[in-house]
Image (cartoon, grey):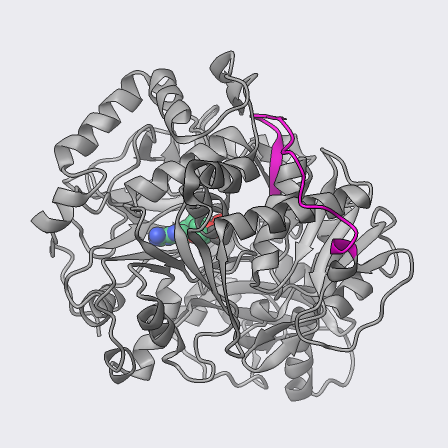
Amino acid sequence: METMSEQAVFPPSPEFSSRAHVPSLDAYRDLCRQAEQHPEEFFSALAEKELTWFKPWDHPFEWNPPFVKWFVGGTLNASYNCVDRHVEAGNGSKVALHWIGEPGDTRDITYAELHVMVSRFANMLKARGLKPGDRAIIYMPMVPEAVAAMLGCARLGVTHSVVFGGFSAEALKARIQDLEASAVITADGGWRRGKTLNLKGAVDDAIAAECPSVHTVIVLKRTENEITMTAGRDVWWHDLDATVTDDCPPEHLDAEHPLYVLYTSGTTGKPKGILHTTGGYLLHAVLTMKWVFDLKPDDIYWCSADIGWVTGHTYIVYGPLAAGATQIMYEGAPDFPAWDRWWQIAAQYKATIFYTSPTAIRALIKQGEHLPNAHDLSSLRLLGSVGEPINPAAWEWYHRVIGKGRCPIVDTWWQTETGGVLIAPMPGATPLKPGSGTLPMPGILAEVVDFEGKPVGVNQEGFLIIKRPWPSMMRTIWRDPARFEQNYFSRIPGIYFTGDAARRDEDGYFWILGRVDDVMNVSGHRLSTMEIESALVRHPAVAEAAVVGKPHEITGQAVCCFVTLKQGNWDNHKLGIELRQWIAHEIGSFARPEEIRFTEALPKTRSGKIMRRLLREIVTSHTVSGDVTTLEDLGVVTKLAAQHDED
Ligand code: PRX
């Protein structure tokens, strides 16, 4: 039941504001004014203050649409900024990571210890012949070594690409090939709901054939799973570690040096390798830690994302560590061994800031208030939400039950492409409206426009665009600049097209309405309808497939597939199970469809385009109870709708 009206407004409390980095709406507006009028001066001053550079830049900004450069000619190192400088400033004994393994093992890692881990790992890569500009894949569980691996790559100028552990061998292989990666960093396993993920097995399957670029696989021992090691190629982390020293000076890298590539789903079957570079990305990451998370030196910050997603990159690794935060990192599932695992951890470590997704909140609501209420959550002072719109009922529960009515909620809108948060409240300044990301960050010129690029009126729906480049903007799609331009800068030439629909209310607040393209949002993760369709038609029984997102109580959307079959005697029930398994194999278990619906024909326009709009309507209005044996006759409805569509 949705109980809260859209008009509800929650102004910041005076105590919160009085201590906040941005203490009032006037202070926020002042930052926006400076950034809008003099963006180069504004971001240059902040880059000088917030980051440590080896060499200053010659020009702050170069814009040849759609390609942008920030801090041109400057050099720095992301790992130096995330680790060394805190140690040099006398904060080596501060805890960087309070890590909790799912089975209950724990480690507290100080900045000084992280410095040693990162330096040694960079030396391990060097020992295996990696050099600046090479690419390494990181396919690891949520353990401190995964953070050290990312920062170790950054130290050396090796571009990393983290692949979420839930992706299959097939998906991993596609990423290795696209990047021509030289190394894969993995583990013998990772813990999830009391079971172990067979990460090394997937790596072996991925590179068994067709991945000639990989000469090194570094394997961390985590679960004692039985694995096979290929002589010459595979090496245990601990064995390699024993051969190196702690001393590894950071490379002086160009501000535009490629820091990482992270793959995300687009509107075709092929994922896009989103490229982020060093200086501008790191600046935005550290700025938003202060602006949005209001981070202070004594905070205990916790972002529940996995490092395989962009939220983990910017708000577990680069943002919090560049800002010198102490954070909590948890390896496993929120429901293991019971649904109060997160609350138990938050209470034990006295978390002050907690950042999660609406899907997680909805799943937790279902388990009941008694679970959080059994733990002392009084240390919390700020809550965050990311990945999808937060519905009023979830907002209300998060605010009342977790935040005890005291903690502001920052609803952060951003994308893999934007590198960091673009629209969100500044919690000491911005009055909150549940369900709205509120207002843009300084320097982010966001607007809602129509097809021609003209701003729409108050409360009217349109496309969300960003009119001016910002420091942490993606630089290109890996090896596909034409697709980069086509996807993001062609709808309105020279202007960044987000792919989201939105409206702005009378106070200028942004309300995100969802994707305008064929991308679904399942549990806050982006999934491409086309990618799943391409995977389905690779199955020998499938003739055609159309995939749409259907509304889902917990995950926001769920994957629903309409499938036509090739001639043959198929057992639809068995095949439904098999096709779900097939998607898990081709993409990953998190993409497994909720529903497979067999039909004799797919609704198409006369020109042969599948009418996903109609299918979306079908799945939205009729809730079929997951019966995989239904054989639908869409013939009549198709004919009618096709006529209507082409009239
Ligand atoms: O549709 C928007 C939705 O998630 C998309 C970006 O997905 P991804 O690149 O996987 O990054 C997710 C984590 C930043 C956006 O285009 N989205 C993200 N945050 C919000 C959101 N929708 C509404 N409100 C949000 N706070």
281 is within the stretch colored magenta: no
Residue closer to the observer: 395 or 301: 301
Name the image quarter holding residue 220. Answer: bottom right
Q: Position of residue 269 (x, y in %)?
A: 65, 53
Q: Position of residue 611 (x, y in %)?
A: 52, 58
Residue farthest left in this picture: 14
Q: Which residues are magenta?
A: 240-261
Residue closer to the observer: 618 or 506: 506
Q: Could you tell whether 288 is left or right of 471 in the image?
A: left
Residue closer to the observer: 86 or 453: 86
Q: Could you tell whether 491 is left or right of 536 in the image?
A: left
Residue 607 in sight in this render: no
Q: Is residue 168 above or below residue 413?
A: below
Q: Position of residue 333 (x, y in %)?
A: 49, 74
> Which residue is rendered at x = 48% and y = 41% of the image?
87
Residue closer to the observer: 563 or 354: 354
Q: Is residue 418 above or below residue 613?
A: above
> Which residue is rendered at x = 84% and y = 59% of the image?
234
